[in-house]
Image (cartoon, helix red, strand yellow):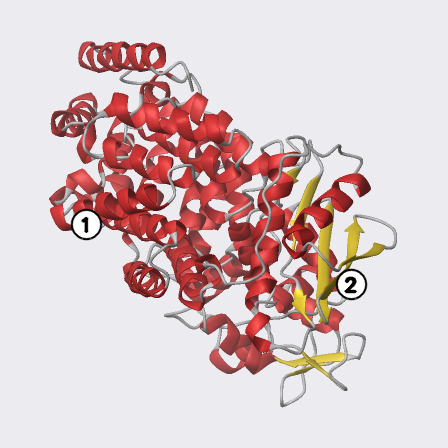
Amino acid sequence: MGVNLDSAGLLDSWKSIALYLKRSIRTCQRLEREAGLPVHRLDESPKARVYAYAPEIDRWLEKTNHTHIPSPGWRLAKVGGAIATILSLAALAAYLGGLFTPTPSGAGKARPSLVILQLRNETGDKSLDYLSSRLQNQLMVEIQAAAEHLAIISESSISDALESLGLSGKDRYSEPEIRAIMKRTDATHLFLGQFWKSGNAWTLNYGLYTVKGPPVQGFIKNETEQDRLSSQVTDRLLAALGIPSAGQVRTLSLKAPDGYTDLFFVEAKKAERAYISDCDEKDLLRAIELYRQAAASHPDSALAFFGLGYCYQNQYLFHGRTKLSRSSMIDNYRQALHLAPDLPESHLGLGWSHFFGGEMDEAYAWFKEARDLSPFNPTVNYHIGTFLGYIGLVDRAIDFLSKAIDYGERSTRAYQMRALCEGQAGRYRAAANDMAKLLELNPTNTKFLCGHARCLLMVKDFAGAERELDVAEVLTPGDLEVRLTRALLWAARGEKDKALEAVRPAIENPLRSTYFLSGVYAVLGLEEEAVRQMELVLEKGPEEFYPLVYPYECLNSPANYLYDKIRNGPRFQGILKRLEKEYLALSSRYSGL
């Protein structure tokens, strides 16, 4: 059914908007909330009658970069229906239709999980604003230390959710917004509160929300022991959740701000998350500069130095492998350890420093110590999972990454790394589920669309993979990863000439495209060319390729049909045996993780 439009292209209801985009009403409402679909209200209240203009929707389709997508009705009648236009529209329509159903593949639903939002400063004293995020952070630390059976949603996951919902910077939330935050983070509970001061007495009142029913309200007043305020809240929360307190929690000094809440630090974390989402080096350079300023303004902040080290690590790993970025990484990680030798993140930093220095046993020892210090810490489990994935122990990496997500790391980076490892382990359906979750968080990310397409083609859902690539091409025309993923799809479908033509640009720089080249050649039965790609990478050594391009579990998985035609060849078998030997040695050597 089409839509009748007046000369201005007016769409006068959710039903009309949904028909225009050929999507469900719920999907259109989600796109308005999360992706800026231009919808107007008569009195700007949430329940008011809505309307939209077709030209504005067309411009919204354009804003995701590069190319204009004519839509049915008003725009298509103006332009005329070229076949290429219709195909592009169909691709985008498939995307808008809620193609990606969020189905987390980890154990995130298995345990109660708690979001702790920043507390609101009602003292009237702006100099105490720092307590809003500091109390939030301290409560996270204390409750996580006290309750191993409760997941505390990480700060990065909360920030991801607030940004994607357009709630960043707010300190007051409506109940629908609270429910949206809980849904986005897969949380079963959410805590928010406010504090004020009268003389020497501090008062904090709070609401504890559950998935259903009204919130549990309460307040705490402390006239003498200011440093125990957060611990009192911790005890109250644990009691409300039916979890016994460990009785050994850290206290919070209310006298001075902490580097963790420094404005530069907060903005650095935001830039770092933007980099992880889009892999744009400009975001990484901005994060580095902001962390530098955070460290300069709070030279005793170990977390600022850890953040700076982690950014230099990404710069070294993905942007040139320069000696300067590696030495900067190590220097900042060592400074974090010097400032806070008992901080788990400091141990993680030393683990990475030794890892990229080729000292695997030392790296393993530091990661193990971080785990021993804080076994239920989502950040610790994420980094250990990443380490294991980088050295090719992908099954065990998935276990740690699933723990990280289960313990509260419901962030882009956690789902992204787990999806990578699941794909390398041959768990393609699970990887597709995580990629779908990523696309819920980042609906216009071309890399995630390509990743989802690769997962779908590995379970032989060729039509689904093609729809994803059509959308990616609309969003980023001419992108090399889109082209190479499409080549892999064509090869898997037996379209040899189209596949070989599509990979031609990558042949000039094969090391950065070896996964695609070897896959295309192998599935087409071109054994010599496929094995040559693998040997080219293996000759360079794993230190040049992290994460590993060809881990043993990836090549050995029966679900990986790309290599079926060359699997019994002597050269492929030689590679497989070499990788198996290395895999078994690492599994035995690092069995403590």
Q: Quadrant of the N terminus?
A: bottom right
Q: Is residue 440 above or below residue 341?
A: below
Percent coordinates x, y for residue 23 in the rendering: 66, 61
Residue 507 vs 442, above or below: the answer is: above
Q: Quadrant of residue 73?
A: bottom right
State the residue lying farthest toward the right. 213
SS class, disc 2: helix
> In the picture, residue 286 is in which quadrant?
bottom left
Q: What residue is pinned by disc 1?
A: 325
The image shows residue 470, relative to residue 384, as above or below, that is below
Secondary element under disc 1, as helix, strand or loop, is helix
> Which mark, by number, is residue 243?
none
Q: Position of residue 219 (x, y in %)?
A: 81, 58
Res. 425 in view: no
Query: At x 41% / y 36%, what residue is drawn?
Result: 383
The Cα atoms of the two marked residues, 2 and 1, are separated by 45 Å
Name the foreground residue: 66 vs 492. Answer: 66
Which residue corresponds to mark 2? 175
Q: Quadrant of the C terminus?
A: top left
Mark positioned earlier in the residue sequence (2 or 1): 2
The picture places residue 13, in percent across and down from the top left corner, at 75, 76
Q: Amino acid at mark 1?
A: Ser
Q: Residues within 10 Å of mark 2 (few under 14, many from 20)?
A: few
Q: How many marks?
A: 2
Q: Residue at x 56, y 81 (%)?
A: 56
The 10 Å Cα crowd at callout 1, few under 14, some 14 to 19, many 20 or more, is many
